[in-house]
């Protein structure tokens, strides 16, 4: 999710292959701009949980898990693009009708009708809520760590969530224009890069403690945990079709996407290895918690928390929209709203209620690493692997070669197994 770092937006429909050019307008994004947008959409705070995932699985097993998760996610993103091209080209040739596949939900509707659209968008919504919850957990735990050494008793993360973050988010929920909040998303990405740089600097200062013999492989049962974290870090499926449509030359998208995934995978693996080898079994579920409370570490923690406070409303925006849409469709709401002021008051109340629910969930989560592994191995696995393979089989099945069908079935089975075990592991093995 950005994984948890980028903001969704509505992108224009752009020029694609020849069969689609007569009904799409040209996009303005260059390959370099698209590369940057991909990185912003994928890289988020989840990366700070990778060293802990490497601690659970081992540095070698974790590296393999990240590489496999990256390659699989890239392949499944291409499946979505193939489905879009196939559907639009087929409808043009057979019926002459103009089919517009703009979102993940559109593919769900093509595969399973209205139920498919609702189910797909529901998964995207819950995954978005999971990313928003992770923001609050991250902020609470980092702020709590700043006061560990300054008092006899540690202030719990939930206190910061309810007494500091929640009031600020309630005020920010009154802002309905994403353009007013968008600059803070770039600030958050800059803070993520700065945090990673300072963490790696701290790791290198402990270079004499590095040992490649330290936990290369910590058991097969640690792999699903690390895989869940890795999938969470790579999740960005809700933006795939929009990013591809934003390019002036859409034929170059797969190569731009490949370059982005190679670079991100290398950064993820390096970050996870350095963090785990530096701190070993003392590696915390958020690597910034391992940093000493000196000025640079404090600046990183505070900067990340401030940035996430202002990007949290962007993460919550799709959830707000859906809650308001459902509220306005209820008959009693339509009956009792008397004026524009009363309607706005009710809609704002819905936003506040959603915020309270997310805050209560975040305050009950014991660990950042275990939570993002759960979200990654369940919701993100369904969105990243199960649905793309299913859509590809149903929508493109008659045109697929035998090896393509075999690959889809393999991804489907592995994705379902991964999601099932991830849920079981998170609910039964709480020490992580």
Image: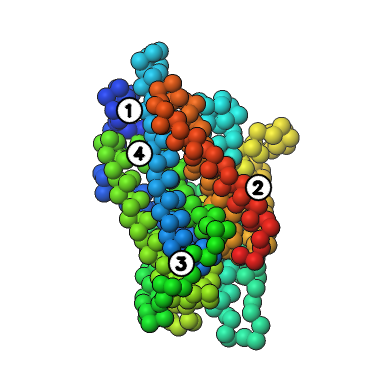
Circle 1 sits in a helix, a strand or a loop, which is it? loop
Circle 3 sits in a helix, a strand or a loop, which is it? loop
Dot 1 or dot 2: first in sequence order is 1
Percent x, y for residue 6?
43, 52
Tags 4 and 1 touching, CB below 8 Å: no
Above or below 148: residue 274: above
Question: What residue do we see at 26% from left, 45% from top?
Answer: 31
Dot 2 or dot 4: first in sequence order is 4
Other residues around mark 3 within 10 Å, as few (<14) / some (14–19) / many (≥20)? some
Which mark lies nearer to you, 1 or 2?
1
Which mark lies nearer to you, 4 or 1?
4
Say the numbered circle drawn on residue 244.
4
Which mark lies nearer to you, 3 or 1?
3
Question: What residue do we see at 49% from left, 40% from top?
Answer: 411
Q: Tell me: 409 left or right of 247.
A: right
Circle 2 sits in a helix, a strand or a loop, which is it? helix
Which mark lies nearer to you, 3 or 4?
3
Dot 3 or dot 1: first in sequence order is 1
Say the numbered circle drawn on residue 216.
3
Dot 3 or dot 4: first in sequence order is 3
Quadrant of residue 297 in the image? bottom left
Q: Tell me: 142 left or right of 203.
A: right
Foreground of the two, 417 or 92? 417
Instruction: Report how far apart the C-alphas of labels 2 and 3 lie in the structure.
Output: 48 Å
Instruction: Report how far apart the C-alphas of labels 3 and 1 lie in the structure.
Output: 50 Å
Q: Which residue is mark 1?
A: 24
Percent x, y for residue 5?
45, 55
Instruction: Report how far apart the C-alphas of labels 3 and 4 lie in the structure.
Output: 38 Å
Q: Which residue is mark 2?
A: 350
Q: Tell me: 247 left or right of 11.
A: left
């Amino acid at each position: 999710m950005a994984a948890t770092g980028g903001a969704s937006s509505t992108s224009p429909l752009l020029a694609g292959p020849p069969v689609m050019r007569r009904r799409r307008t040209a996009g303005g994004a260059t390959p370099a701009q698209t590369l940057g947008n991909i990185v912003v959409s994928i890289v988020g705070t989840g990366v700070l949980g990778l060293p802990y995932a490497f601690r659970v699985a081992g540095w070698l097993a974790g590296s393999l898990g990240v590489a496999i998760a990256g390659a699989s996610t890239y392949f499944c993103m291409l499946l979505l693009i193939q489905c879009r091209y196939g559907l639009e080209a087929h409808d043009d040739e057979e019926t002459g009708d103009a089919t517009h596949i703009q979102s993940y939900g559109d593919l769900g509707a093509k595969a399973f009708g209205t139920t498919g659209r609702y189910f797909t968008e529901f998964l995207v919504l819950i995954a978005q809520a999971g990313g928003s919850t992770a923001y609050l957990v991250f902020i609470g735990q980092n702020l709590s760590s700043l006061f560990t050494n300054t008092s006899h008793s540690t202030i719990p993360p939930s206190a910061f969530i309810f007494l500091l973050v929640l009031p600020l988010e309630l005020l920010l929920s009154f802002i309905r224009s994403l353009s007013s909040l968008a600059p803070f998303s770039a600030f958050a990405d800059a803070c993520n890069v700065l945090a990673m740089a300072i963490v790696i600097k701290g790791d290198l200062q402990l270079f004499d403690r590095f040992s490649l013999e330290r936990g290369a492989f910590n058991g097969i049962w640690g792999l699903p945990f690390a895989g869940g974290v890795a999938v969470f870090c790579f999740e960005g499926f809700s933006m795939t079709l929009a990013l591809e449509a934003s390019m002036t030359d859409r034929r170059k998208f797969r190569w731009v996407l490949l370059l982005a995934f190679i670079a991100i995978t290398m950064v993820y693996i390096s970050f996870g290895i350095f963090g785990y080898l530096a701190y070993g079994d003392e590696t915390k579920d958020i690597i910034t918690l391992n940093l000493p409370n000196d000025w640079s570490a404090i600046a990183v923690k505070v900067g990340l928390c401030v940035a996430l406070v202002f990007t949290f409303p962007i993460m919550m925006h799709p959830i707000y929209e859906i809650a308001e849409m459902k509220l306005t469709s209820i008959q009693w709401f339509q009956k009792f709203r008397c004026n524009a002021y009363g309607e706005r008051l009710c809609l704002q109340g819905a936003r506040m209620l959603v915020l309270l629910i997310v805050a209560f969930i975040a305050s009950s989560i014991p660990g950042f690493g275990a939570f993002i592994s759960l979200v990654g191995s369940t919701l993100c696995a369904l969105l990243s692997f199960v649905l793309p393979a299913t859509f590809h089989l149903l929508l493109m099945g008659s045109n697929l070669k035998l090896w393509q069908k075999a690959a889809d079935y393999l991804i489907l089975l592995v994705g379902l197994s991964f999601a099932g075990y991830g849920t079981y592991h998170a609910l039964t093995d709480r020490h992580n």
